[in-house]
Amino acid sequence: MQPVLEERAPDYLEIAETVLAHADWKEALDSVIALVRSVFLFDNMALYLRESDSGGLAEVVYARAIGRGRSAEADGAWGSEVANLVVAQAQAIVKTPDATTPRNERMFFPYYLGLPLRAPGEVLGALIFVRYGGPTYTHNQIQRAQFIATQFSSLFERKRLLELVARLKDAQRQVDLQETFIATISHELRTPLGFIKGYSTTLLRSDTEWDEPTRREFLTIIDEEADHLNRLIENMLESARLQSNTLSMNFQALRLDGLLRDAALRNQNRCKTLQVSLETPALMPILADGVRITQVIENLFSNAIKYAPGAPITIRLRETENGQRILFSDAGPGIAPENLGRIFDKFYRVPGQGGSGSGLGLYICQQIVRAHGGELTAESQPGRGVTFCIDLPADPRTVLSGG
Ligand code: ADP
């Protein structure tokens, strides 16, 4: 004879309310599981979802062993085969041990009940219940389980909608940024081009003779503006290469203390009033791309000169557990917390900030550091400056290969 199951009156409303009360689907499942078991007895419960893009096999996303299955380790304990059948056939499936199973061993055999999780017009996945050693599922119990599957379906439908909203918001943000970028970049490209065109047209005028110093002055402006234009175009190309993953790195033994000293000297020669203090002890070389790391440091210098004019700069170099850290600080105006989180976004510029730029510099720097298996972050106390922190591993190959 089958053992008699004692079940209290199912509190459907409480289950529905608990599912609705949680924005996070995992929290909702954790909270509802005890209620579910009070209306429907089971040992194991598993939820499978189909990959919506690939439409491939259903993968388990949530599993709980509560009763006798708690010690069951076998893969079969979660009923993935049944789940995929349920998804393929879009209907409830009951699978019980076959009649040849010796009665005294039934305790070890799972009785599966699989139910489809549905959204309008499609099957999202499957809900699997397992009872070890039975009893099998009655019509009434299957109906209760179907009610639970409906509640879980709404949970996953909501999860999918929330993910869709997040993706759309992200796409909208990208479009906004692209639009700002096009406006900024066309302005940025036109300004140097305007100078070049203006001064060269002036020099070419047939009705005026220019003396040598004036000619030199105009040609110097043309030369500088052409360089500026070149840098802008190079930045745009670089970010396109980063996006298509075609930025190649040339890792070689590199002494960071030497690189930092050279960069400081170069910038002090360029900008005579620049105060730079270095705390850069001689450390072992690390494996890095010297040209790219120089590019990052140069970018931090040019930003400090642009956005923290006249403020002293401090550069510190330290050893870390698996590599070295450069701390690049300026004592300028800093960046407000609400903007700080976005300065590494492509095309982002702090609103209302002067100085020319495309908002690509820090994005490129962060991508370069990441291509070394490292990380570039920033901290700031408004009014007291910004500190950029570059963490580099001693050997990027070990980090990038996941070893
Ligand atoms: P940009 O081409 O605008 O300089 P970046 O990506 O290099 O672009 O920097 C993004 C924004 O971060 C800048 O527009 C600026 O508002 C802010 N920023 C960068 N460095 C500093 C700094 N040292 N102090 C204050 N603000 C900074």
Image (cartoon, grey):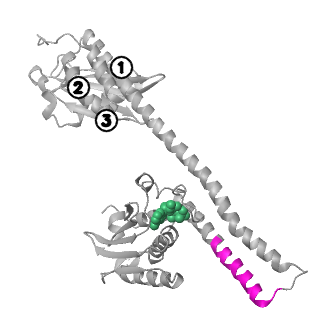
Q: Which residue is mark 2?
A: 33
Q: Residues within 10 Å of mark 2 (few under 14, many from 20)?
A: some
Task: Work out whether residue 287 can be spotted.
Answer: yes
Look at the image and tell me in which quarter the N terminus lies.
Answer: top left
The label number, if any, that marks residue 22 in the structure image: none
Mark 2 or mark 3: name the one nearer the start of the chain. 2
Q: Which amino acid type is shown beneath numbered disc 2?
A: Ile
Q: Which amino acid type is shown beneath numbered disc 1?
A: Thr
Does 212 lie within the magenta span?
yes
Provide the secondary structure element on which disc 1 rests: helix
Left or right: 348 with respect to 44? right
Q: Residue 199: give x, y in percent of width and height.
A: 77, 76
* Vertical order, 211 against 18 (above or below): below
Q: Which residue is mark 3?
A: 60
Mark 3 or mark 1: name the one nearer the start of the chain. 3
Give the Cα distance between marks 2 and 3: 16 Å
Does 66 lie within the magenta span?
no
Mark 3 close to ligand 1, CB under 8 Å: no
Q: Residues within 10 Å of mark 1 (few under 14, many from 20)?
A: some
Q: Residue 126: give x, y in percent of width and height.
A: 34, 27
Task: Work out whether residue 54 can be spotted.
Answer: no
Q: Quadrant of residue 49?
A: top left
